[in-house]
Amino acid sequence: MEASMTKRSALKRQTRESTREFGVLDSSQFIQDAKVRRLPNHAGWSPYPSNDERDQAYLKTLKPKSDGQAELMTMIDHHNLVLALGPAGTGKTYLAVAKAVEALEAGKVGRIVLSRPAVEAGESIGFLPGDMEDKLAPYLRPLYDALSDRLSMKRVKALMAEGLIEIAPIGYMRGRTLNNAFIVVDEAQNCTYTQLKMLLTRLGWHSTMVVTGDPQQSDLLPGISGLADVAERLSAVPDIGVVKLAERDIVRHPLVASMIGVL
């Protein structure tokens, strides 16, 4: 009994001291046995003066780091078909996937379709075990990295299980019509002219397609890649965006831009 009275007295004393320091308090903020006390939020002071204006920590704001990236993001926002050509490190794949996630989260599209040619960079890795997604996983690793940067890997797996993120091998795209989707075709320099023509004509209603690639880094035999030819032909079509990124748009290590300039 005496201990209970002592606790109540201490609580009243603490309430009086807080009232003198901060003003009138709401008694509903305090619970008899609570170990956490909320300070009043009407004092008008914060350690962060611009606390209400800053971005929330768990939301990654997508911002361009160069003029070329800003142009690419604008093209994606205003065109249903965009071709992004440029050297390594210019953020082509990352921006395309980030825009796809943004569109899915906003409800603008019903699913994301990721496609990439299964072509090794100069060496054969042989047959791979598992189902189709397991076999394509090494080739699609850059797309997974970009996805996991915008979403947690647990969320990515859940969306893939629900069919909201689809892995579509180029060889299986013939005859399909992709409606209400955001399609990302990565490493398009490893596609032939015929493959690109087939891929581009998969575009359906309420869909956006972004094709990325570097014509200077094709893993096909010389003259086989059709990306440069397709981009040149489509640049004359008003409703199709063709963005050509340059060395100044590289956002990787500064040595990457220096190497690309001389290699």
Image (cartoon, rainbow, N blue to C red):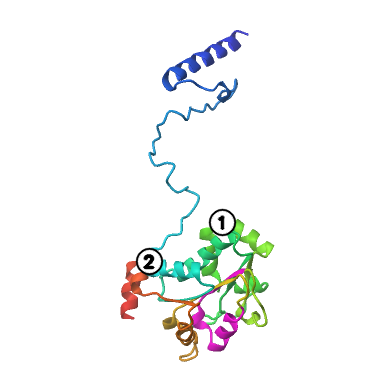
Specify whether 215 is left or right of 35.
Answer: left
Classed neighbour count for the residue bearing mark 2: other residues with Cα under 10 Å, few (<14), some (14–19), many (≥20): some
User: Extreme front residue here?
Assistant: 238
Q: Which residue shows up at 47% across the image and 30% down it?
A: 41
Please identify the quadrant where the C terminus is shown: bottom left
On the question of residue 253 being in view, the answer is: yes
Question: N-terminal of the two: label 2 or label 1?
Answer: 1
Residue 64 picture location, percent across and down: 41, 63
Residue 199 picture location, percent across and down: 58, 81
On the question of residue 219 being in view, the answer is: no
User: Extreme bottom residue here?
Assistant: 223
Judge whether 154 appears above or below 84 on screen: above
* Residue 189 or residue 95, whichever sits in front: 95
For disc 1, the marked residue is 152
Q: Which residue shows up at 43% across the image and 22% down it?
A: 22
Which quarter of the figure has residue 245? bottom left
Under circle 1, the secondary element is loop
For disc 2, the marked residue is 251
Residue 88 picture location, percent across and down: 41, 74
Asked whether disc 2 touches disc 1, contact meaning CB atoms under 8 Å apart, the reply is: no
Mark 1: which amino acid?
A: Ser
Q: Which residue shows up at 68% across the image and 62% down it?
A: 162
Judge whether 158 appears above or below 250 on screen: above
Residue 190, magenta (yes or no): yes
What range is drawn magenta here? 181-202
